[in-house]
Image (cartoon, grey):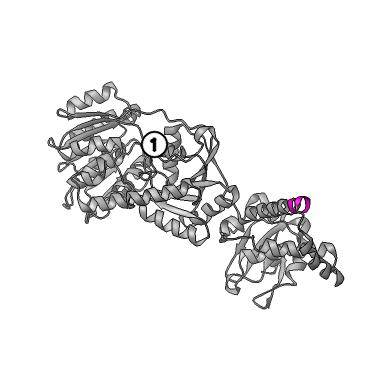
Amino acid sequence: MKFENFPISKEILRGIEEMGFEEASPIQVSAIRPLLEGKDLIAQAQTGTGKTAAFGIPMLEMVSTEKVVQGLVLCPTRELSVQVADELYNIGKFKKNINVLAIYGGTSIERQIKGLKKGVQIVVGTPGRIMDLMRRKILDFSNLKLAILDEADEMFDMGFRDDMKTILDKTNQDRQTCFFSATMGKEINEFSKMYQEDPTRIQIEHKELTVENISQYYLEMKSNMKNEILSRIVDIYNPKQTIVFCNTKRKVDDLVMNLTTRGYSADALHGDLKQNQRDSVMKRFRDTFTDILVATDVAARGIDVGSVDVVINYDLPQDEEYYVHRIGRTARAGRKGMAFTFVVGRDQYKLKDIMRYTKADIKYMDLPKIADIDHLNEKNLLDQIIKEVENSEDLNKYKTTIDTLLLKEYGCVDIAAALLKILSKTQEGKNHESLDNVDYNLKTSKRKERNTRDHSRIFVNKGRRDGLSPKDLVSILKTARIDEKMIGEILIKDNFSFIEVPKISTKRVLKTLNNKKIKGKNIVAEPAEKERRKK
């Protein structure tokens, strides 16, 4: 069911669309309308079924711009409080002058008091801190329109029963009350008799979610790295076909444009496409004319393409159940598949919900480096050469060129090395941008202790203002026969830099650096300890 079919405002619909929700989940279909109609509600639903939007949309619709607390969500933990408040803010971001505040212990109460005094319509928080602010007469619930107890069974198990009772007793009698819980115990039924009137009951069945033959990984990164890391995964694993999931139609279109610019064959699939356009996109994908399909959740339902080797969660799904639907697009008909999930910042909380809900074994993976792609290219090149030498019968026309070079008294090894260099330059870093923190170990933090035992630190008299980059230093060190994997921390400052190299190679590195120039200026390098003594 589309959200447009609910009696909700354009501002809320815009927030929903920007968040990537295209179609209501079962709990949303069942809960939104009765809450909008003013009914009390008891809903049995697991974490990850979309319940925050189920109660958040009606709550945001019913609150006014009057600067009094009209909506309350009680949560068992600070993490859930922050998560719920963030989602409510995003859903209602286009509804002007509506403020949402998360209130929980373990952080400054003064800051929360200041936020409340500015005027807040919706409060999301843990029972303990809410009680504290009520005792201080900072929080007043006499104008409350809707009270939500989220994960009510958890709050009962954590001993919040008396706190919840005290809070609800201080609210006005004509409010709506809604309980969301994974289980329906005796306490919830008791509370329902005390605080609800003829509640609507909803039960969303917990499905058994299983995924077989799929290796699952997550990668932590900054949001601006996503496009680059995605292209590296595709190049390293070289899947026959890939499906990439994004949460919004706009992001799907932007990503397809980026991938196409990089030289990949990619197509978009989302709700704005007409049926004949969707059919055309899917035909190209099934016929393998397209290698990468970038899609939203709703558009990708029912996709069954047997040759999909890799699924990438470019964005984490809003609904944990969708995670299984997404990665299930690979490993069809008994084949093996891989799933990669991109995690940015607070996505960690959502990832934990997914792992708990799906019982999935999602392993951490280091971000792939350009060097990994270069090594793979070298191996592929070597395999191609061996294949040509062993199997090709048509090398004579190339031998003429080799004879010409031999007549000039160049050695066979030098000729072969030069040709390999020319070939590898056409492949190295193709379509890729360097990421300092990933590819060159650039750090702004303290020196890593693990490097102190077997690495020495070298001071270089050039820095960012001289145009020196981590890539420049790595390139120079390669000429000193230093394996990139052996290079330690690189720290680039405005006027100077530090680099860590194996102690055994220090003299060779110093000699190499002191014979190089950057932007026409001589580099001066010396042991960092010596530089400190001079100062």
Q: Residue furthest left?
A: 174
Q: Which residues are magenta?
A: 387-391
Report the side of 427 relative to 433 (left or right).
Answer: right
**Residue 183 is a magenta residue:** no
Residue sitting at x 28%, y 52%? 15
Report the side of 250 relative to 399 (left or right).
Answer: left
Q: Main secondary structure of the magenta part?
A: helix
Answer with the quarter of the image where residue 416 lies: bottom right
- Residue 527, visible in the rendered structure: no
Percent across and percent down for residue 14 are 27, 53
Amino acid at circle 1? Glu
- Residue 282, visible in the rendered structure: yes
Q: Nearer the viewer, residue 338 or 50?
A: 338
The answer to whether residue 184 is above or below residue 477 is above
Percent across and percent down for residue 468 are 62, 70
The residue tagged 1 is 321
Report the side of 63 relative to 158 (left or right).
Answer: left
The answer to whether residue 171 is above or below residue 439 is above
Q: Nearer the viewer, residue 521 or 57?
A: 57
Q: Helix or strand or loop: what does disc 1 sit on?
A: helix
Q: Quadrant of the image for the C terminus?
A: bottom right
Residue sitting at x 46%, y 30%? 210
Q: Quadrant of the image for the N terminus?
A: top left
Residue sitting at x 76%, y 63%? 480
